[in-house]
Image (spheres, rainbow, N blue to C red):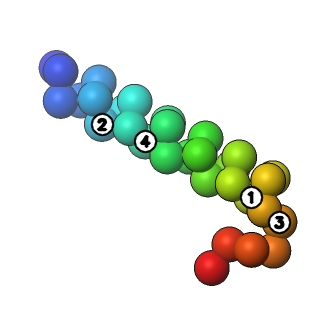
Amino acid sequence: MKIVARNALMGRTESLGMMLAELALPGNIA
């Protein structure tokens, strides 16, 4: 149960981070 919740949280954090990075640095994502 802990591992599943942890993976879901990490996935959300990664997707949010990617979205923010794209908004902050448009065209600079390799």
**Alpha-carbon distance for marks 3 and 1?**
5 Å
Residue depicted at x 81% and y 74%: 27
Q: In the image, what residue type sits under mark 2?
A: Asn
Disc 2, disc 1: CB below 8 Å? no
Q: Hey, what amino acid is under mark 3?
A: Pro
Distance of label 2 from label 3 (alpha carbons)? 27 Å
Residue with the mark numbered 2: 7
- Select label 4 or label 1 by which is in front: 1
- The residue at the point 18 percent across, 30 percent down is 3
Which residue is labeled 1 in the image?
A: 22
Locate the C terminus and report the quarter of the image it occupies.
bottom right
Of callouts 2 and 3, which one flags the residue occurring earlier in the amino acid sequence?
Answer: 2
Residue 26: which numbered mark, if any?
Answer: 3
Label 4 sits on a secondary structure element that is helix
Q: Nearer the viewer, mark 2 or mark 1?
A: 1
Q: Cβ–Cβ below 8 Å for labels 3 and 1?
A: yes
In the rendering, at what x and y percent does residue 6 appear?
Answer: 28, 29
Viewer-proximal residue among 1 and 24: 24
Q: Looking at the picture, does residue 7 appear above or below residue 25?
A: above
Of the numbered discs in the image, which one, if any, rests on residue 11?
4
In terms of secondary structure, where does tag 1 sit?
helix
Marks 4 and 2: CB-CB under 8 Å?
Answer: yes
Q: Name the image quarter holding residue 10.
A: top left
Give me the residue at 74% from left, 58% from top.
Answer: 22
What type is the residue that disc 4 sits on? Gly
| Image location (x, y in percent) of residue 24 | 79, 53
